Amino acid sequence: MIGTQLAGNLMQGLVLGGIYGMATMGLSLIFGVLRVVNVGHGAFIMVGAFITLWIFTAFGLTPVIAIPVALIVGMAIGFVFFYLVMRRLIKAPELATLLATFAVGILLEEIVKLIFGSEFRGYNWPVGKIVLPITVFPMSKIYAFIGSIAIAMLLYIWFKKTRAGTAVRSVVEDSEGARVCGVNVSWVYALSFAIGIGLTVTSGVLLTMFIPVGINPYMGGGYTLKAFVIAVLGGLTSPYGAFFGGLIFGLIENGSYTLFALIPGVEAFAMTRFLSFLILLLILLIKPTGLLGAK
Amino acid sequence: MTLLKLENVTKRFGGLTAVNKMSFEIEQGESIAIVGPNGSGKTTLYNVISGVYFPEEGEVFFEDKNITHLPSYRRAPLGLGRTFQIPRPFSSATVRENVAVGAMFGTLSHQIGVDESLKIADHYIELVGLSAHLDKEAGSLTPTEKKLMEIARALAMKPKLLLMDEALAGMHPRDIDKMVTFLKKVKEEENIAIVSMVEHIMRAVVGFAERVIVMYQGEKLIDATTAQALSDPRVVEVYLGHPPEGTHA
Amino acid sequence: MKGKIVKYYPLVPVYIVYILLFLIGINVSGMWQLVAMLAFYCAIGQAFNIFLGMTGYVDFGYVAFMGLGTYGMALSILYLHQFQWLGIGIIIIGLLIALIMASLLSIAVGAVALRLRGAYFAIATIGVNEGFRFLIEGAKIWGGSEGIIFSGQLAQAFGKETASVLSTLWADIFLFFIAGIAALITIYYMRGKIGYALTALREDEDAAKVMGINVTKYKIIAFITSSSLAGVVGASAWALKLTYVFPPQAFEIHYTVECIIIVLLGGAGTLLGPVVGGLIYGLTKYWLTVIVPGFQLLIFAPIIIIIIVAFPEGIIGVLKRRFKGSAFKKFII
C-alpha cells in the first residue's frame, strides 16, 4: 500500500518538478548572463499567478491564453526593471543588486496587494482528469507539465538556433570576448534579463494550473527558496540544469512528504521545507557548481 | 638559505597548462626580472607564488618552508609582498589607511597596532612621494599615484621578497628611470629581493635587473644574467613569433 | 591617553540622542510607545550594521537570530519560573541564553556560509532562516508551530505587578542599553584593526588576502557580534515584552527588510547611520501607520531602490562628503 502511495506521489512530484524547474530557468538565466541573483524571484511568479487569475475570472478565458500574455507582460516588466534600475548597478557592488532585486520583489507584492487585496484566492478549471493505476492527475496538471516542457524546449531551440540566442550564450561564456567579437553586450544583458523575468512570470501561470488555490500577494516567498535550492542543484548558471534540478527537487519533495507523514509527532509539510534547506546548504558546501554544473 | 625556490611547479586550468614545470631560485637581495610575452604564464606564476592558486604539481618554498598549499593571507607575514598590474586600492579608505593595512597585517611580527601602522604608513608614503595625498581617498588618485601607493603599501609590509606586476608598464620613460633608481635604493636599504614582471626587456629591466628569467608558453626558457639574456637568439625569436628550437609550437 | 579618548568622540552625538529619547519618553505622557519603537529600530539597526555595513555581505536571514533570542528568553522564563529565589536572575539568565543561542547559531552558520561569496552567502542565509523556522515547526520543538505563551509563568515568577512593569517598561529600557553597547562596539571595531581588515575585505577580498588579512576570521567576528546582539534584542523586545513567541512571527522576513532599510537609509558602515536611519524609519512608519495603514512597505520599497541607485552611501555618507575637512568631521562617522 505504501509502495503505490509512494510511487503515486513520486509521479506527482516529477510532474510538479517540471513546473518548478521551468520556474527556475529564469533565475538561472539571469545569474548566468548578468551574475545577478534575483532575490525577488518569487514575487514575479506571483505576478504570473495573478495574471492567470484575472484572465480567468474577468474574461472567462482558459489559463492557456494567460501563457503568452504573461510572457509579454513579464518581458515588459523585465525591460523596465532593467533600464530603470539594473543597468545603473552593473558596476555597483554585489550587495546593491541583491538589495535592488529584493526591493523590487517587495514593491510588486505591495502593488498587487493594493490592487487585489491580500485574501487567498483561487480558481477552478474543470477540464477532467486522467486516472492511472497508482494515482490520479487532473488534466490541468498535465497541461501545465506539457507547457513547461514546451517552453523549455523552445528556449533550447532559441539558444541554439537564433542569432540572439547565440549572442547570449557567448556572453555567458566570456563577456569581454563577446564584446570584442562585436556582440552588443548591454543589449544582451537587457534581453536576457527580460527573458528571465518573462519566463518567471509565465511559470506563475503554469504553477496555478497545477495548484489553482492559495493565490495571494505573499505567495512568492516560499517559491523563492525552492527556486534557489533548484538553481543550486542544477548549477546556478544553467537554465537546463535548473529544469532537471526541478525534476529532482519535485521527486525529493513529494517523496519525503510521504515518508515524513509516516513519522508520528512530526509535521510533514514543515519538515519537507526544512529538508529543502538542508539540501541547499549541503550542495553549497560540497559542490556549489551544482550536481549538474561544470567543475 | 634560498629565499624563494620553485620546484617543477605546474598549474593547469582544465585542458590548458598555464605554467609547466617551472623551477628556479631567488636569493636574498637579488633583483630579478621575469619576462615574457602575453600568455607566457607570468601572471599565473605570480598567483601561484602569492597563493591565489595552488599548483597541481610541484612545490614552492619560502626560506626553506614549504608554502605550496598555504593560504595567501598566511604568506604575507612570512615576508612575501605583491603589487598588482592594475592597482587594487581600497578605494573608500584614505591613502594613509591603505598603506597602514600593509603594516598591520603583512608584517612578520603581526603585533603592529593601528597607531604604529599609521606612523609606518607615513614613512613609506613619504618615500614614494605621496605625502601631499595622505588623507585623500585612494579611489580619487591618478593611475600613476595609485601605482605608487600600491608600492608603498607593499613596502609597508616589510617584505623580504616583493613581487611587482608590470609596475612600470605605461609609464613615461623619465618616470621609469626615477622608479628604477627608487627601487634600487629601496632594495639596498631594506634588503628586499625584488622580482619585477614585465612584458618586454626594456630599458627599465636593463637598468634594474641583475638576472632575467624568460618565460615562453608556461615554461622557463632562459635564466641568466641580463646581458646574457639580451644576446640570446632564442629570446629574440620569442618576440618575433617563431617558437625557439627545442620548444613545442 | 588623550589619543585613545579622542577616538571615541563620535559616540557623543549618538549617546546624546539616546539620552534625549529616553528623557522624552519618561517625561512626556503617551510618548513611551513611540520612543520604545525608535529605540528598538536604532538598536537593531546598529546591530545589523556591524555585519552588513562593515563587511558588505547581506544576511537575508538575520531575523532568525532575533527569533532564536526570543526563544532563549521564553525558555528561561518557562523553565525557571518556579525558582522564584532567582528573582531578576531569571531575566538575566534569559538574556544570557539568548546571547549564547544566537552566538552558537551564528558560529555554525558563519563557519559554513562565510566561506561563500556574496550571492551564495545571501542565498544560504535565506535558507538558514526558513530552515530553522520549519525545523521548529516540523519537529515540533519548543511548542512547534503554536509557539510558547509564558505570560502566566512570568507573573508567577515575579508577581503580577512586577511582571507587568518588566514587560511594559524594562523590556524597552533594555533596548536603550543594547543600542548603547552596539554603538560602543561599532566604534571600537571601526577604529581598531578589525575595522581596517573589514574595510579592506569589503573593498577587495582578494587583495586583502594578499596583504595578509585572514578574511574569514574577520567576517566571522563581525557576524557573531551582529547576530548575538540581534539575539539579545529579540529576547528583550519580543519575548519579555510580548510574553509569547510564535514561529511564523519570530522568523518573519519583514523584520530583516526593516533592518536593511534602516542601515541603507542612514548609511551603511557608519556609526551615526543606523541611528539616523532608525529614527527616520521609525517616525515615518509610525506616521504612515496613522495615515495609510498597511501601505508602509509600498512606500518604502521604491525608496530603497532609489537609495541603492542614487545614494548608496545613505544620509550620513552624503553628510560626510559635505563636511569633509570641517571640525564636524570628528563627529560624523
Image (cartoon, coloured by chain):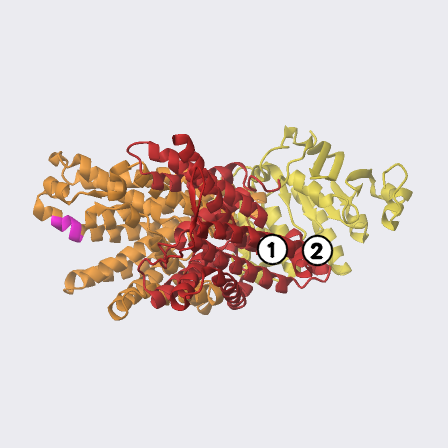
> In percent of the image, x 46 and y 43: which residue is there?
C218
- Residue A132, relative to residue A189: is it above or below? above
**Quadrant housing residue A295:** top right
> From the image, which quarter does the N terminus of chain A lie in?
top left
> In percent of the image, x 66 and y 59: which residue is there?
B144
Q: Is residue A141 visible?
A: yes
Q: Is residue B115 visible?
A: no
Q: Which residue is mark 1?
A: A154
Chain letter, orange in picture:
C
| Distance Cα–Cα, label 1 vs label 2 | 27 Å
Label 2's element? helix
Q: Relative to the observer, which residue lies in front, A69 or A107?
A: A69
Label 1's element? helix
Q: Which residue is mark 2?
A: A177
Chain letter, red in picture:
A
Q: What chain does mark 1 sit on?
A: A
> In percent of the image, x 62 and y 57: which residue is there?
B146
Question: In this rendering, would B58 be left or right of A195?
Answer: right
> In percent of the image, x 32 and y 48: which residue is there?
C251
Please say if the residues under marks 1 and 2 sit with CB atoms less than 8 Å apart.
no
